[in-house]
Image (tube, helix red, strand yellow):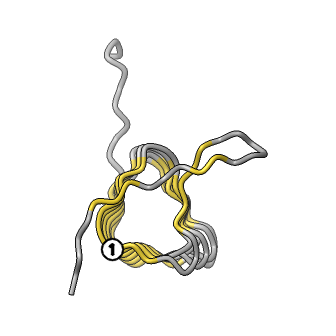
Amino acid sequence: MFHLFRHRTMANQSQQSGTMYNAITSGSKIIGTIIADGDIRIDGTVEGEMQCAGKVVIGEKGLIKGTVSCQNAEIMGMLDGKITNSQTLALRSTGKIKGEVITQTLIVEPNALFNGSCQMPAASKPANSK
């Protein structure tokens, strides 16, 4: 049975760097929709949809099954679904993607696994260029 709910992640403030981030820790599982205004790190499991205004990091033990929309992404764990990001997606050596990728820039390290499709739309030109 699939339960769908809307979940706004809570921001944690790092005492050392002073930056804001969101985190789904190892052992946590969220089924539904996540909307994050800032960066988010996934070390647990997410099934559903994720909308992130910043960077999505999937840690080595992290799993996202569903759709992701973000600005940048770094994948060290597993993504099973579709990811659309407006800038750069980095698939690290421990990372795995099964599905569809839409990104401006794709970085794939040796030993990473990518089974699916990738679309890289042309960069938009400035309004004053010919």
Considering every residue shown, the one lying at the far right of the view is: 16
Q: How many marks?
A: 1
Q: Which residue is mark 1?
A: 31
Q: Quadrant of residue 124?
A: top left
Report if residue 112 is visible in the image: yes
- Residue 81 x, y percent position in the rendering: 32, 72
- Neighbours of disc 1 within 10 Å: few (<14), some (14-19), many (20+): some
Please provide percent x and percent y for residue 87. 45, 44
Give the amino acid at mark 1: Ile
In the picture, the quarter occupied by the C terminus is top left
**Residue 114 appears in the rendering:** no
Q: Residue at left 32%, top 57%?
A: 119
Task: Answer above or below: position of 71 versus 100.
Answer: above
Q: Observer-nearest residue: 37 or 66?
A: 37
Residue 123: % across, % down: 37, 37
- Above/below status of 97 relative to 106: below
Q: 17 left or right of 63? A: right
- The quarter in which the N terminus is drawn is bottom left
Outermost top residue:
128
Residue at the image position 30 percent from the left and 62 percent from the top: 33
Q: How far across and how far down the image is residue 31, in percent?
A: 33, 74
SS at badge 1:
strand
Q: Give the residue furthest to the bottom.
A: 1
| x 59%, y 70%: residue | 59
Q: Is residue 29 above or below residue 84?
A: below
- At a point 64% along the width and 46% down the height, the residue shown is 13
Front residue of 88/79: it is 79
